[in-house]
Image: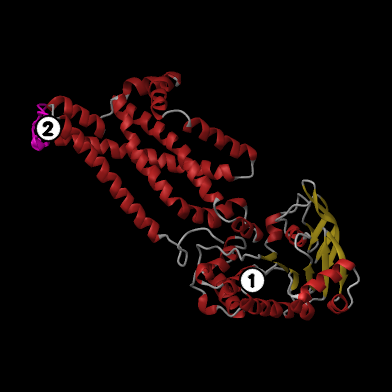
């Protein structure tokens, strides 16, 4: 294969202003972080709430949460994104529609769509993790909480959730990593996050391999760092004397 | 203090409690025994409504447990419950296990709750373990903490559901000792247990349950010395055979 590797490409001018290609990647990293963190916040709050709802005795509340999960888990992420970006805005009230489509910077409206889409999609997955985390706790724990006169809310707050939270850290970490990886769908509606920047670099410079290698490395480093941080968190909150959660 | 009137409970087709009537007066210690599957655990769990009942009435301290208008949480706060498997909160220290409900349910301030917890830990002989976590304690120690946790709510009644059944034999004694002391202090107690020595020494009377019914109710002397019911005789015979 005749290919001229050129790792210096990232420090060369893009021909637009006085930008070098590396600047594009830095902008891209900024968008990826902004997307993933905001979507994760949505997913964690909503998913946590839905996960608790699924474990409640109230049939309506758990039913609503179950429907949510089935809906968002069984439709491909990309389809959901196109719905949020291309379809949903047309059904908004007219003033909001004009604001979303015309007043907003196109990057910002794409950003909002992806955050909503990815946040709601991931919430369904977080919900399932939280639900199993709560259900994995011994039945005696909720009994003990009831027996001292805790309300349902107090049982969750002081007894069940602090334990479930520790159980679900590892699966939630992998959901968190998924959010970063899934944020690359934003490139398909023109948001210039890492993948979009890599594609653009490949097209501008013709150094396809370098362009995608750097994108790969950025995703990889990002996710490895998150895993490291989360394993530190996991150790920090580990319960003294208990190697593995659960048991009794 | 505790009154059960014609209590029935069905699990689907299974008639677990079949017309139970029982009266426990203030300061009395009642031991409930019976073969496995007789409904004795279900019986004690209905008193603070960890199990609902299908029919009948249950009264605790003059309040109806089964009346939907009763604030169940308020009532449960006055009834201590000790489980077979301790059910301490594994994520909290021994001290926090004991102070959690006084602080959150009774709105006691932290300093007072800590002081009370330390007093109770001294009473069960575990003051030196206040900063340990449940998983660092032996079963007997965990159960003593669980009793202290129950007492921290200053309950009017203490219920024990097979408190020594999950323990290694050498730890049974330390838990029973705590329960004996508690009985001596005048606490109203109802206790599902197979510890017949405990029943003999401490109980005001023994209730024998079989197939969801109280088939015999007698003082320990009468029950152990001269059981009336055929099933009770069998049961005691089997216990002695060991």
Q: Which residue is mark 1?
A: B147
Q: Dividing the picture into quarters, in which one does residue A87 lie?
A: top left
The residue nearer to you, when weighing A10 against A101, is A10
Q: Residue at x 52, y 58 (%)?
A: A246
Tell me, yes or no, whether the highlighted magenta stretch contains residue B20.
Answer: no
Question: Mark 2: few, some, or many residues within 10 Å (few <14, many ≥20)?
Answer: few
Q: Position of residue A128 (x, y in %)?
A: 50, 42
Q: Dividing the picture into quarters, in which one does residue B239 lie?
A: bottom right
Q: Residue at x 42, y 51 (%)?
A: A169
Chain letter of disc 2 in the image: A
For residue B64, side relative to residue A33 (left or right):
right
Q: Which mark is residue A19?
A: 2
Q: Residue at x 56, y 36 (%)?
A: A66
Tell me, yes or no, whether the highlighted magenta stretch contains residue A18.
Answer: yes
Q: Which mark is residue A117?
A: none
Q: Position of residue A36 (x, y in %)?
A: 34, 39
Q: Are marks 1 and 2 on the same chain?
A: no
Quadrant (top left, top right, bottom left, bottom right) of the C terminus of chain B = bottom right
Quadrant (top left, top right, bottom left, bottom right) of the N terminus of chain B = bottom right
Could you say whether the residue bearing mark 1 is in a helix, strand or loop?
Answer: helix
Q: Is residue A109 above or below residue B124?
A: above
Most prominent secondary structure in the magenta stretch? loop
For residue A244, side relative to residue B72 (left or right):
left
The residue nearer to you, when weighing A138 against A97, is A138
Chain letter of disc 1 in the image: B
Q: Which residues are magenta?
A: A1-20
Q: Dividing the picture into quarters, in which one does residue B77 lie?
A: bottom right
Q: Is residue A37 above or below residue B162?
A: above
Residue A33 visible in the shown view? yes
């Amino acid at each position: 294969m005749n290919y001229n590797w050129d790792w210096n490409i990232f420090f060369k001018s893009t021909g637009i202003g006085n930008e070098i290609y590396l600047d594009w990647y830095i902008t891209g990293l900024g968008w990826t972080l902004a997307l993933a963190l905001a979507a994760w916040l949505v997913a964690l709050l909503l998913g946590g709430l839905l996960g608790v709802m699924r474990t409640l005795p109230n049939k309506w509340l758990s039913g609503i949460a179950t429907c949510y999960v089935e809906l968002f888990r069984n439709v491909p992420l990309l389809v959901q994104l196109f719905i949020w970006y291309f379809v949903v805005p047309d059904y908004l009230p007219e003033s909001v529609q004009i604001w979303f489509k015309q007043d907003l910077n196109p990057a910002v409206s794409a950003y909002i769509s992806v955050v909503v889409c990815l946040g709601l999609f991931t919430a369904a997955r977080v919900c399932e993790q939280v639900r199993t985390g709560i259900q994995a706790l011994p039945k005696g724990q909720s009994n003990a909480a009831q027996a001292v006169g805790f309300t349902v809310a107090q049982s969750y707050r002081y007894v069940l959730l602090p334990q479930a939270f520790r159980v679900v850290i590892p699966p939630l970490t992998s959901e968190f990593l998924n959010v970063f990886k899934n944020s690359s769908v934003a490139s398909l509606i023109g948001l210039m996050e890492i993948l979009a920047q890599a594609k653009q670099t490949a097209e501008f410079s013709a150094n396809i391999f370098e362009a995608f290698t750097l994108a790969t490395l950025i995703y990889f480093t990002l996710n490895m760092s998150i895993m490291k941080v989360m394993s530190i968190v996991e150790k920090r909150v580990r319960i003294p004397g208990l190697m593995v959660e659960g048991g009794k | 203090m505790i009154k059960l009137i014609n209590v029935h409970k069905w699990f689907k087709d299974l008639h677990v409690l079949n017309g139970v009537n029982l009266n426990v007066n203030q300061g009395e210690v009642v031991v409930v025994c019976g073969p496995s599957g007789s409904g004795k655990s279900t019986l004690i769990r209905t008193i603070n409504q960890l199990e609902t009942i299908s029919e009948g009435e249950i009264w605790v301290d003059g309040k109806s447990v089964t009346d939907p208008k009763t604030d169940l949480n308020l009532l449960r706060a006055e009834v201590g419950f000790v489980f077979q498997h301790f059910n301490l909160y594994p994520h909290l220290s021994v001290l926090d296990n004991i102070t959690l409900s006084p602080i959150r349910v009774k709105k006691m301030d932290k300093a007072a709750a800590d002081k009370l917890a330390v007093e109770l830990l001294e009473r069960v002989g575990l003051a030196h373990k206040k900063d340990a976590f449940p998983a660092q304690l032996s079963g007997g120690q965990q159960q003593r903490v669980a009793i202290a946790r129950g007492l921290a709510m200053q309950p009017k009644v203490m219920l024990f559901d097979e408190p020594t059944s999950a323990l290694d034999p050498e730890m049974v004694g330390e838990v029973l000792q705590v329960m004996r002391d508690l009985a001596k202090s005048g606490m109203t107690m109802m206790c599902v247990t197979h510890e017949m020595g405990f029943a003999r020494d401490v109980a005001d009377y023994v209730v024998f349950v079989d197939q969801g019914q109280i088939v015999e109710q007698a003082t320990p002397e009468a029950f152990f010395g001269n059981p009336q019911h055929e099933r009770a005789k069998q049961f005691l015979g089997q216990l002695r055979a060991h």
